Image (cartoon, grey):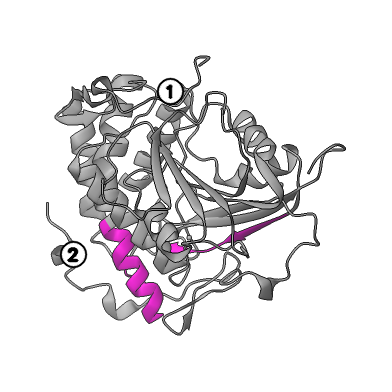
Amino acid sequence: MASPSTEATPSAPAAAPAPDTTSQAISDPAPAPTTSDVPGATNPDIGGTTVSDQNSAIEPDTSAEHSDVDSAFGDGTESYTTSLASSIFDYKYENGRRYNAYKHGEYFLPNDESEQDRLDLVHHLHLVVLDGALHLAPLRKPNRVLDIGTGTGIWAIAFADEHPESEVIGTDLSPIQPGWVPPNLRFEIDDAESEWAYQSKFDFIHLRTMGGAIKDIPKLLRQAFKHLNPGGWLEWQEYETVVQSDDNSYPPDCAMARWIENLNKAAVKFGKEMNIAPKIKSLVEDAGFDNVSDKTFKVPITPWAKNPKLKELGKWNMLAMHDTLPPYTIWLFTNHLGWQQVEAELLIKEVRDELKNLRIHHYCV
């Protein structure tokens, strides 16, 4: 699924110094950047073709509606940074998937190799949405950078390579990051919802696809605000867990619609809302950030669009959706909706089969 983008600047305290959708919050005492200051901020050009923004309709490719797309895929306080002790590798197993040991049950997604491959695919999808950019914030040689929920560390590694002048820290509940990394990067096993114990502030804090993972977003943003230097930036890239179409081709009772409804319901019962993207801008502002901007991009669910670059984006999103369905469904639905695993797997199959129907012109933001 795809991404929105929000930007903001935290107002300075008196005694000291703030594509579906991406959010960026910026801590910068200077005026908010103009569109030209932010690479790819509006209508970013993907491979020479402009990506549709949220307000423009996407033209479907009617010639593709009968195409065979089966080949696209097959059928200190409590808060402290934990050292890499053997206990964090004592993984838990449910429904045939492997889950984090540290704070087990606080995160719904697995951390096995299949999930790691999916995370890297989603990283590529974000790069396509942003025309290859790792971020939209207009950074100027940031000294310290924090990547929250780093996952496989793929974004942090790329950023550290791109910015050898920066000290980059990636945090996650799972120790699934590689050992060979750039010398200016380190990974820490940590819970971003616990109290932060960093002694030095950051110039850039990056978050991505945190829907369903955070219980207290206002607290998280307050801590980010507190740990940003004057002129620092916060960027949050997130997709909406809402699917829509511009031509009413997305049936309200289709398998995808039923999956989305139950996914959001299960996440609420889990205590960590999934569809947080529409709220990020206001939450960032409430945390004290100034100059907040929100950038949204339409991303087709499947390759139904006529625009060749949107069609390519739809192909990647279709693959991502195919791999996203099991991890986003099994644990949440069985643990919080009372479903049997076979019921969840049947719905997954229905949605996957439906993805092959290019007459449905749906997209996420």
Viewer-nearest residue: 129 or 146: 146
| Residues under numbered marks 2 and 1 in contact, where contact means CB atoms less than 8 Å apart | no
Residue type indicated by callout 1: Phe
**Which label belongs to residue 72?**
2
Q: Residue at x 44, y 65 (%)?
A: 162
Q: Residue at x 36, y 57 (%)?
A: 123
Image: 2 above or below 98: below
Q: How many marks?
A: 2
Q: Residue at x 57, y 33 (%)?
A: 198
Q: Is residue 133 left or right of residue 31?
A: left
Q: Residue at x 58, y 54 (%)?
A: 143
Q: Earlier in the sequence, mark 2 or mark 1?
A: 2
Task: Read off the residue under disc 1.
Answer: 270
In the image, is residue 295 part of the stretch drawn in magenta?
Answer: yes
- Residue 1 visible from this viewpoint: no
Q: Which residues are magenta?
A: 292-319
Label 2: few (<14), some (14–19) or many (≥20) C-alpha neighbours in 10 Å: few
Q: CA distance from mark 2 to mark 1?
A: 33 Å
Residue 226 visible in rendering: yes
Q: Is residue 91 above or below residue 42?
A: above
Q: Is residue 357 left or right of residue 211?
A: left
64 w.r.t. 274: above or below: below
Amino acid beneath label 2: Ala
The residue closer to the viewer here, 325 or 151, is 151
Q: Toward which corner of the image does residue 121 lie, by quadrant?
A: bottom left
Is 30 covered by the magenta stretch?
no
Q: Quadrant of residue 17?
A: top right
Residue 221: give x, y in percent of width and height.
63, 36
The one nearer the camera, 339 or 335, is 335
